[in-house]
Image (cartoon, rainbow, N blue to C red):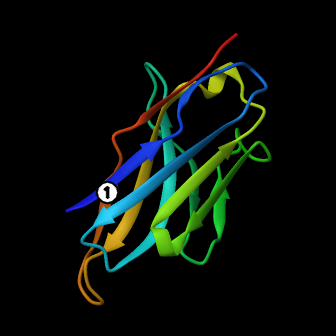
Amino acid sequence: QVQLVESGGGLVQPGGSLRLSCAASGSIFSIGVMGWYRQAPGKQRELVARITSGHSTDYADSVKVRFTISRDNAKHTVYLQMNSLKPEDTAVYYCNAEYRRALVGNSYDAWGQGTQVTVSS
């Protein structure tokens, strides 16, 4: 089993910043792509940003320039620095990781439990 534990959510005023962290633990041989998704009330879950083990990144158009994803491969941890937050960024943010348990074999998907981010004055 692999667990992803998120932290760093909360309430922030428009224009403020938050940093989310997500640490993976358990039976891990390697982790490939790690990402952050979000789901607002009444909406589908959407990709926010993702990063490969080689640190290539991809962002949703709505967060480009404002958000930065990074990772520490040695710690199996991914971060999301969120700046210039807007009310429309309010959502539950979920961490995702694609991992392997051995050198050969299948890859698996793990999800965190989610952390609430609320942007409001």
* Residue drawn at point x = 51 percent, y = 73 percent: 73
* Residue drawn at point x = 71 percent, y = 24 percent: 86
Give the vertical position of 2 relative to 66 (above or below).
below
* Residue drawn at point x = 79 percent, y = 25 percent: 15
Residues 68 and 72: in front is: 72
> On the rendered image, what quadrant is the C terminus found in?
top right
> On the rendered image, what quadrant is the N terminus found in?
bottom left
Residues 29 and 91: in front is: 29
Give the vertical position of 39 relative to 101 (above or below).
above
* Neighbour tally class for label 1: few under 14, some 14-19, many 20 plus, Cα within 10 Å: some
Q: Report the side of 117 relative to 22 (left or right).
A: right
Give the vertical position of 33 relative to 63 (above or below).
below
Q: Report the side of 29 relative to 84 (left or right).
A: left
Give the vertical position of 47 relative to 69 (above or below).
above
Q: Name the kind of residue labelled 1 in the image.
A: Ala
Outermost residue toward the bottom in this view: 103
**Residue position for label 1:** 110
Position in image of residue 112 (x %, y %): 36, 47
Position in image of residue 54 (x %, y %): 60, 78
Mark 1: secondary structure:
strand
